[in-house]
Image (tube, rainbow, N blue to C red):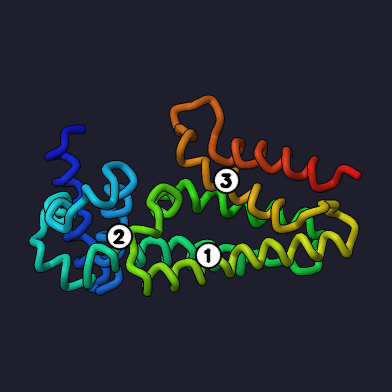
Amino acid sequence: MSGSSKKRATASNWRDAGLRHDLHDAKRRLILSQAARMFADDGFHQTTIEKVAAALNVTKPTIYYYIDSKEDILYQILQLALDELDAALAAIDKPDAVAIDRLEVFFQIYCEIILSDFGVCMALVTDRSLNAEYRKKLRGLKKEFELRVRSIIADGLRDGSIHVGNPRLFSNAIFGAYNWMPQWFSKAGSMSAEEAGREIFKLFRKAATST
């Protein structure tokens, strides 16, 4: 598909969003989706508001109606990725399940999110591109999910389903493995995202359950 065709398709989505929903959030999400792809493919600093507007076939002032700055776009992208992960986890939360199984469910969902447009952007674009205030807010959000995983690991140490000597190191290692997926995973490969995610977890399950 040519670049102009891509722009026409995106612009159509923009118009349709207004017709279907007439909602501020529908068009804001289109901006975030487009920007997320461009940040991941071209880099945060190389992507300008003008380029995002051109890709959507709208004017620069239109973009600024929905966002405050390029930094605000990046922060909203990363916040939305984490919000979607939180919502998905809340919908299937089973606190009575064995901890190692709960950990697997967490990373099944995390794998799906990290390979979405928003998740790829979250993984590939460093939060150092944000100013100190936004960076502090974002790192606070990320910390919540790290603490959730550490809590599951702690439950596993109590129920006997997890055996790790250094829970923090184990948590950092498993997040690192999944956060690296956008660097190498290809939809054109022989393995689906779900299969790749399961294979990664098998390695960590084996490490966590060996005595």
Looking at the rendered structure, the secondary structure element under dot 1 is helix
Question: In this figure, which residue is indicated by the disc labeled 1?
Answer: 142
Specify the amino acid type for callout 1: Lys
Q: Earlier in the sequence, mark 2 or mark 3?
A: 2
Quadrant showing the N terminus: top left
**Residue 113 % position (x, y):** 50, 53
Q: Is residue 16 above or below residue 22?
A: above
Q: Nearer the viewer, mark 2 or mark 1?
A: 1
Which of the two residues, 171 or 181, is positioned nearer the viewer here?
A: 171
Mark 2 residue crowding within 10 angstroms, few (<14) / some (14–19) / many (20+) = many
Q: Left or right: where does residue 181 sit relative to residue 4?
A: right
Question: In this figure, which residue is indicated by the disc labeled 2?
Answer: 32
**Residue 85 % position (x, y):** 53, 62
> What is the CA distance from the residue labelled 2 to the residue labelled 3?
22 Å
Disc on res. 71:
none
Which of the two residues, 84 or 123, is positioned nearer the viewer here?
A: 123
**Residue 180 % position (x, y):** 52, 42
Q: Left or right: where does residue 22 sit relative to residue 57?
A: right
Q: Nearer the viewer, mark 2 or mark 3?
A: 3
Specify the amino acid type for callout 2: Leu
Q: Residue placed at 70% from the left, 53% from the top?
A: 169
Q: Left or right: where does residue 208 sit relative to residue 12?
A: right
Question: In this figure, which residue is indicated by the disc labeled 3?
Answer: 178
> What is the CA distance from the residue labelled 2 to the residue labelled 1?
19 Å
**Residue 92 % position (x, y):** 65, 64
Q: Residue placed at 87% from the left, 43% from the top?
A: 210
Specify the amino acid type for callout 3: Tyr
Whether the residues at callouts 2 and 3 have beta carbons within 8 Å, the answer is: no
**What is the quadrant of residue 160 in the picture?**
bottom right
Whether the residues at callouts 1 and 3 have beta carbons within 8 Å, the answer is: no
Looking at the rendered structure, the secondary structure element under dot 3 is helix
